[in-house]
Image (tube, rainbow, N blue to C red):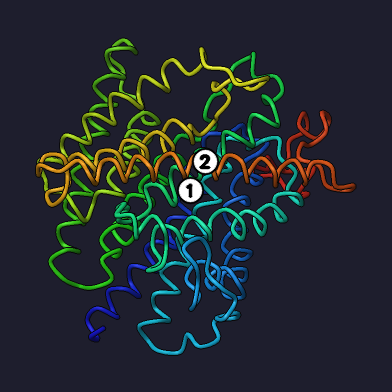
Amino acid sequence: MDSGSIAWMLMSSALVLLMTPGVAFFYGGLVRRKNVVSTIMYSFISVGVVSVVWVLWGYSLAFGEGGSAYIGTLNNFALSGVDTPDAQIFAVFQMMFAIITPALITGAFCERFRFKTYLVFLVLWVTFVYAPIAHWVWDGNGWLLELGALDFAGGAVVHINAGIAAIAAAALLGNRRNIGKGVKAHNVPFVILGASLLWFGWFGFNAGSGLAADGLAVSAFLVTNTCAATAMLIWVILGMIHNNGKVSGVGAAVGAIAGLATVTPAAGFIGVGSSLILGVVTGIITFYIVQFKGKISIRNFNLEDDALDVFAVHGVGGIIGVIGTGILASSGGLIDGSSDLLVNNLILVVSTIIYSLVISLVILKILDIIPGLGLRSTESEEDDGLDVSDHGEEGYIVD
């Protein structure tokens, strides 16, 4: 890379890192006040845990030299051999994606997942779920990349992957206690602040994924903002229709995130017109999934209790984006006269869903039976709030 591209990639990496505190505030504002510290810490601790895992073996499993079609190697353990500026900035940039992906999962199981178990879950999930899928899609030897599937910045690797794992975890845990009384976002300014940080950081997420300061970065930046803005407006309009003309701050924030998640896999392959189409489609679909999610149940888990709408926003948004890439890509998409990319991206969607679901369930089942761990907090801990039970701290103190 030239010095300009290195500077841009350093900035992009920092922008993507900023997204994880954005998730922390976005999620933290949506839960009950007695769990705000716990929910923010789910995201914040990921920065520390995943950074170390990634440097030691995560990067090597995803992108290690001599890897097969399905997994890397440990040849680059502790980043051994990753010693050029180009290689190191790629490792740093990819590390930020690995950090935020498990943090996204936490929105579906917040307010009831044991924190010490979550620490172990982070290590295992990044190792056995995130790294292999990243290898499939983004490594030169990966079978999905060789097949011809395209995921520019993580529609499958990050968003579908996290959305499916989130549903798996929440279904095993069951609903939060006392949600029949209704659970409202306790701090709407936190939600909007978090969404704003995410939107800002997403320019590094998408525009940085071309790995250069060039015209592709400019185009990805533009379509990212356009899709997010369009989806936000769709959510606002539909929200006004269903809410007596009122404009929900939470709805606007969620709509923007849905648009950002959806454009992520497509950002390097579409133009502005296609980003407008994606924004409209994802705005409508994700809004109505959230609107009627109370009617969707999986075992003892009702989708109503996906507090941060992880599946509806990230999972569904990622699916729309990956399929939309197969249709709308200006080169190789269905509108360009070829169905190959669409077929390959459908394979990408299905394989990500199956692998993430199965391996996430296995990891969670194992953690649930290990003495001293277990997935769910006790009833008394949930009633008192996980801020006190897990952290010995409270988000708000009245003098």
Q: Quadrant of the N terminus?
A: bottom left
For disc 2, the marked residue is 27
Please tell me whether mark 1 sits on a helix, a strand or a loop. Answer: helix
Quarter of the view holding residue 256:
top left
Does the CB distance between marks 2 and 1 fall below 8 Å? Answer: yes
309 relative to 341 in the view: left or right: right
Please tell me whether mark 2 sits on a helix, a strand or a loop. Answer: helix
For disc 1, the marked residue is 23
Q: Which one is in front, 36 or 90? A: 90
Percent from the top left, x then y, of residue 125? 62, 53
Q: Which one is in front, 33 or 106? A: 106
Q: Which one is in front, 115 or 374? A: 374
x 81%, y 42%: residue? 374
x 55%, y 41%: residue? 28
Amino acid type for the residue under numbered disc 1: Val
Amino acid type for the residue under numbered disc 2: Tyr
Percent from the top left, x then y, of residue 395? 64, 44
**Label 1 crowd bin: few (<14), some (14–19), many (20+), radius 10 Å:** many
Q: Is residue 338 above or below residue 295?
A: below
Q: Is residue 47 above or below residue 368?
A: below
Q: Quadrant of the C terminus?
A: top right
- Mark 2–mark 1 distance (CA, rounded to whole Å): 6 Å
- Give the residue furthest to the right: 371
Percent from the top left, x then y, of residue 306? 55, 29
Residue 116 numbered mark, or none: none
x 45%, y 74%: residue? 91
Percent from the top left, x then y, of residue 288? 36, 19
Q: Is residue 57 above or below residue 280?
A: below
